[in-house]
Image (cartoon, helix red, strand yellow):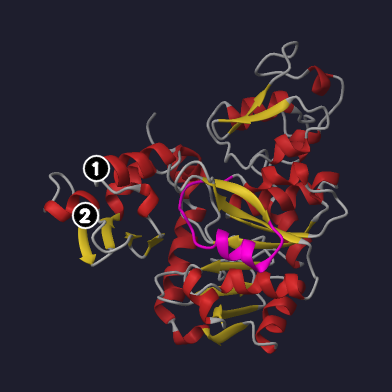
Amino acid sequence: MTAATVAQWRELYAEVVDPGLCMGCAACVVACPRGVLAYAGERPVQTDAESGADGCRFGDAGCTVCAKACARLRPQTVMLESAVMGRAHRDDEPAGVARSVVAARGASPAVHAAGQDGGFVTALLGWALEHELIDGAVVSGVDPTAPLLPVPVLATTPADLLAAARSRYTYSANPLLLRDVPPARRVTLVGTPCQVSAVRRAQASGLKRFRSVVFTVGLMCSEAFTVEGFLHGVLESRLGIDLRDVAKVNIKGRVLVSVPPGREGRLRQGAIPGSAARIAAPGLVEVPLKECKPFAREACHHCPDFAAELADVSAGGLGLDGWTIAMARTGIGEDWLHGAAFEGAVELRDAGDFPEALAVRDRLAAAQRRRPAKHAALPA
């Protein structure tokens, strides 16, 4: 097979899905005009019985839409960077192209308290809704029937945004919701770097289902954990924490789990054999990151993008307490960032006030660029 081969589901399956490179963003499922691709187990699956799991009779007849939505299939990084930011990143830009880099947080005490690392993203989206720049935001919410289980939701009010605030560090295929968003609506997509890159790839290919996305917020991300391994295995089974008690999960070099004081699980009775988890303060359980690393999603090992380099605005806590490092990468990203600050929705500080956070960003971004090649070189 040559690079000139026109790709369809057959190639997408053979080169991405079957080898385990699929990030589970669901962009191909959203794009499929025949409705034969479904989403199951964080992977796209072929449902057409006449096609077989690894084939597609519509693709054989000339349909290439699903392949055009996949950012992992024959990546076009330089083309996408040039289309989004006007140029590709330089070697001295390990975290990608940026017009502005600041520390930011929500100005409202309620947003600041409810959000992750100061509530910057929640505040920015609330400002955009208030000014009718968007009709809603596709974000990660929580399944009302299962504690901490993330699901994509469309937030159309500030109350919706507050309800969905905070990270959970398990995967939510936010682009999947775009199946239900009419192209005429204007939405922000908040997602991991892989999800943002998929939307950009689909938009560059002119796919109709992605026209509704007029702004993207990328959440800096090294990896997401599996629901079974992290939530049920580490928190619930090993530590004895009731998932219904978890108010917040954060990662600051270690995993921090916030619960009501007195609800710290099995640690209330003392140390847990085989674990270095501890009660760092009443209501705060600290788990060494290395105890959770084995439960990272396999797809994350192939991801080269830590800093969401194709987003309009990228955001990451990077070890800060109450602040987020925000990178405005596009003209609209810079307009929104400084517009929200000018009108008092967000507070900004010079990112240079937090040199350690910037160093962490650059170190993680540089390391992640090397990750796919490094992982491919590991023995099977």
- Residue at figure coordinates x 71%, y 27% from the top left: 37
> What is the number of the mark on residue 238?
1
Give the image location of residue 175, x and y in percent.
68, 47
Residue type, mark 2 in image: Ala
* Vertical order, 170 against 12 (above or below): below
**For mark 2, what is the residue?**
277
| Figure check: 42 above or below 166 | above
Q: Position of residue 167 (x, y in %)?
A: 49, 58
Q: Residue 326, relative to residue 206: is it above or below?
A: below
Locate residue 84: give its quadrant. bottom right
- Dot 2 falls on a residue whose secondary structure is loop
Q: In the image, what residue occupies the spot 50% across and 40% down? A: 299
For image coordinates 57% across by 26% down, the residue present is 18
Q: Are marks 1 and 2 in contact (CB under 8 Å)?
A: yes
Magenta-drawn segment: 155-172
Q: Of marks 1 and 2, which one's residue comes earlier in the chain?
A: 1
